[in-house]
Amino acid sequence: MAFRKVGRNASGQPDAREGMALIRRIREAGYRLPVIVLTGWPEDLYGQPEERMVSRIMVKPVGIPVLLETIAELTSASAPSRNLP
């Protein structure tokens, strides 16, 4: 499992383009594992093609128990295939 912190643009704000590029690279490489996006700015992802490439978008702050429950849900044997784009 990999975690990546997205870089910042010239004004110091998080640069969503880096995160979206990472999502595309994961899918282009053929990986079908669940991708969970933790973000403070979900509107940057909503409506973008990358939104359909992720399993879950979670808005920060996310509690550890909720994150662990989400991971368990998405990686369980009974998880619907739609969670693995």
Image (tube, helix red, strand yellow):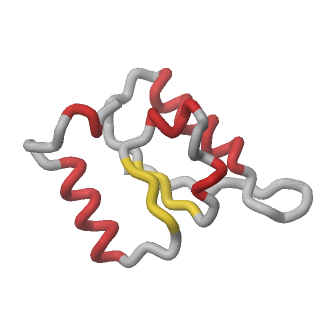
Q: Residue at x 63, y 35 (%)?
A: 21
Q: Nearer the viewer, residue 46 or 57?
A: 46
Q: Nearer the viewer, residue 65 or 52?
A: 52
Q: Residue at x 30, y 71 (%)?
A: 66
- Extreme right residue here? 10
Q: Residue at x 60, y 66 (%)?
A: 40
The image shows residue 71 at horizontal and vertical percentages of 27, 57
Up/down of 77 relative to 69, above or below: above
The image shows residue 19 at horizontal and vertical percentages of 62, 45
User: Which image quadrant is residue 83 in?
Assistant: top left
Q: Residue at x 9, y 43 (%)?
A: 77
Q: Quadrant of the C terminus?
A: top left
User: Which image quadrant is residue 64 in?
Assistant: bottom left
User: Which image quadrant is residue 10 in?
Assistant: bottom right
The image shows residue 72 at horizontal and vertical percentages of 20, 58
- Extreme front residue here? 47
The image shows residue 17 at horizontal and vertical percentages of 71, 42
Up/down of 83 relative to 40, above or below: above
| Total marks in image | 0
Residue 38 shown left or right of residue 9 in the figure: left
- Extreme left residue here? 78
Residue 79 shown left or right of residue 57 in the figure: left
